[in-house]
Amino acid sequence: MSKKQEDILNTSIKLFNEYGFVNVGVDRIIHDSNVAKMTFYKYFPSKDNLIRECLLERDKLIRTSIMQTLDSCNNGIAKLKGLFEWYENWFKQKDFFGCMFVKANDELIHDVLLVPIIIEHKTWLTNTISIVLKDIKTELSASQIRIILDGATVNENVYGDNVAITESWALIETMLNYAK
């Protein structure tokens, strides 16, 4: 990937993350990326193409970061707790504006090319949680935990009070105690 293409992609991720997909136009991306219009269209023939590339890149970054966190933990419970700590750290970042995949689904529901990207991202997370749960030997489902994490993400984005993930982890601990 060229430096200009990378600049466009990173600038777009930042803008889409903060302002949403509908509210950010190509002209703003071109301006903030400091590239010529021709350069933009050389790499991204349309805004729709750019959005797909942004989601794929965001997915890659999240996967890498979560896997680094899980790999640093030594057992199932520590990995599950580590996942919740990853979310807590994400929520505390100044550039936290909620989940880009949820935003894409909400704002661009009619883009049939985005749906598989969104589903693949959420499926990967669910499968990753499932692997962690096998180490714990619990009856909890990975889907339950992913749904709780999705809810915590929305809650934190709305309230910004740093309570969502703590309350979510307390719920998981209670569920783990009852599921044994």
Image (spheres, rainbow, N blue to C red):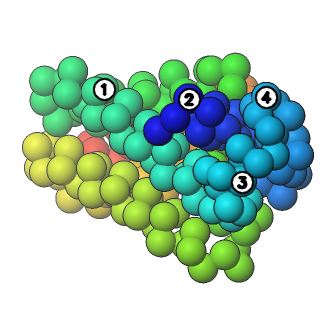
- The residue wearing badge 4 is 34
Q: If you read the primary sequence from the N terminus, does the residue marked by circle 2 or circle 3 appear first? A: 2
Distance Cα–Cα, label 4 vs label 3: 13 Å
Q: Position of residue 143 (x, y in %)?
A: 37, 61
Quarter of the rendering containing residue 62: top left
Can the viewer see residue 52? yes
- The residue wearing badge 3 is 41
User: Which dot, 1 or 4, sits closer to the camera?
Assistant: 4
The amino acid marked with disc number 1 is Thr
The amino acid marked with disc number 4 is Asn
Judge whether 139 appears above or below 28 on screen. Answer: below
Q: Residue at x 61, y 50 (%)?
A: 43
Q: Position of residue 135 (x, y in %)?
A: 11, 43
Quarter of the rendering containing residue 75: top left
Q: If you read the primary sequence from the N terminus, does the residue marked by circle 1 or circle 4 appear first? A: 4
Q: Position of residue 152 (x, y in %)?
A: 58, 43
- The residue wearing badge 2 is 3
- Say few, some or many: other residues with alpha carbon within 10 Å of mark 4 (under 14 / 14 to 19 / 20 or more): some
Q: Residue at x 63, y 62 (%)?
A: 49
User: Which dot, 2 or 1, sits closer to the camera?
Assistant: 2
User: Which dot, 1 or 3, sits closer to the camera?
Assistant: 3
- Say few, some or many: other residues with alpha carbon within 10 Å of mark 1 (under 14 / 14 to 19 / 20 or more): some
- The residue wearing badge 1 is 69
Q: If you read the primary sequence from the N terminus, does the residue marked by circle 4 or circle 3 appear first? A: 4
Find out whether the residues at labels 4 and 2 contact each other: C-beta distance under 8 Å.
no
The amino acid marked with disc number 3 is Tyr
Q: Which mark is residue 164?
A: none
Find out whether the residues at labels 1 and 3 contact each other: C-beta distance under 8 Å.
no
